[in-house]
Image (tube, rainbow, N blue to C red):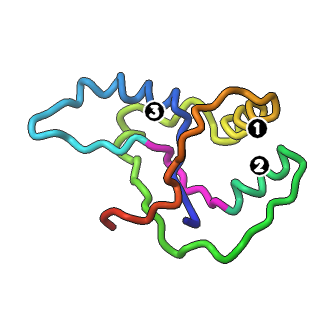
């Protein structure tokens, strides 16, 4: 994937809890994600800076990605309170101090789904 929408889990949790007033039947669809489209190459380079390493890329990113439009969530709840740059710094710090992880696959590389 060449791009992704990302959001800090704390912001997604807060939006989820605040969305109860939106419940409808049939269900309303609400995309809870970050509003920006983030380049994975940019993110890898930024993590490279934070880890003082140079990322090595193989191949080229796909021209397509499974992205979400968070405009309705942004209208209802406002912009996420935690900027992407801060999230990336937190993640880098956690990895540097060998913080615990669940060691579960992200399935980020999956390309199945509806376009």
Q: Quadrant of residue 96?
A: top right
* Quadrant of the rendering where the C terminus is positioned: bottom left
Q: In the rendered image, which residue does mark 3 sit on?
A: 12
Q: Is the magenta stretch mostly helix, strand or loop?
A: loop
Query: What segment is highlighted magenta in the picture?
Result: 33-40
Element type at marker 3? helix
Tag nearer the camera, 3 or 2: 2
State the residue in front, 24 or 62.
62
Measured in 3D between alpha carbons, the distance from the residue under mark 3 to the one under mark 2, in whole angstroms, is 22 Å
Residue at x-position 67% and y-position 27%: 100
Residue at x-position 85% and y-position 45%: 51
Tag nearer the camera, 1 or 3: 1
* Vertical comparison of 20 with 105: above or below: above
The residue carrying pointer 1 sits among few (fewer than 14), some (14 to 19) or many (20 or more) residues within 10 Å by Cα, namely some
Is 71 on the left or on the right of 39, as rendered? left
Q: Is residue 43 magenta?
A: no
The residue carrying pointer 2 sits among few (fewer than 14), some (14 to 19) or many (20 or more) residues within 10 Å by Cα, namely some
Residue at x-position 52% and y-position 47%: 106
Residue at x-position 65% and y-position 76%: 60
The residue carrying pointer 3 sits among few (fewer than 14), some (14 to 19) or many (20 or more) residues within 10 Å by Cα, namely some
Q: In the rendered image, which residue does mark 2 sit on?
A: 47
State the residue in front, 86 or 109.
109
Q: Where is residue 88 in the image (x, y as percent from the top left)?
A: 70, 40
């Amino acid at each position: 994937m060449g791009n992704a929408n990302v959001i800090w889990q704390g912001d997604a949790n807060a939006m989820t809890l605040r969305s109860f007033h939106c419940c409808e039947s049939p269900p309303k669809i609400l995309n809870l994600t970050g509003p920006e489209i983030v380049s994975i190459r940019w993110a890898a380079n930024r993590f490279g800076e934070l880890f003082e390493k140079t990322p090595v890329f193989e191949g080229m990113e796909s021209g397509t990605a499974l992205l979400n439009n968070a405009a309705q969530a942004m209208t209802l709840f406002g912009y996420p309170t935690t900027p992407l740059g801060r999230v990336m710094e937190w993640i880098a710090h956690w990895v540097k101090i060998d913080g615990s992880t669940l060691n579960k696959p992200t399935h980020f590389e999956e390309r199945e789904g509806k376009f």
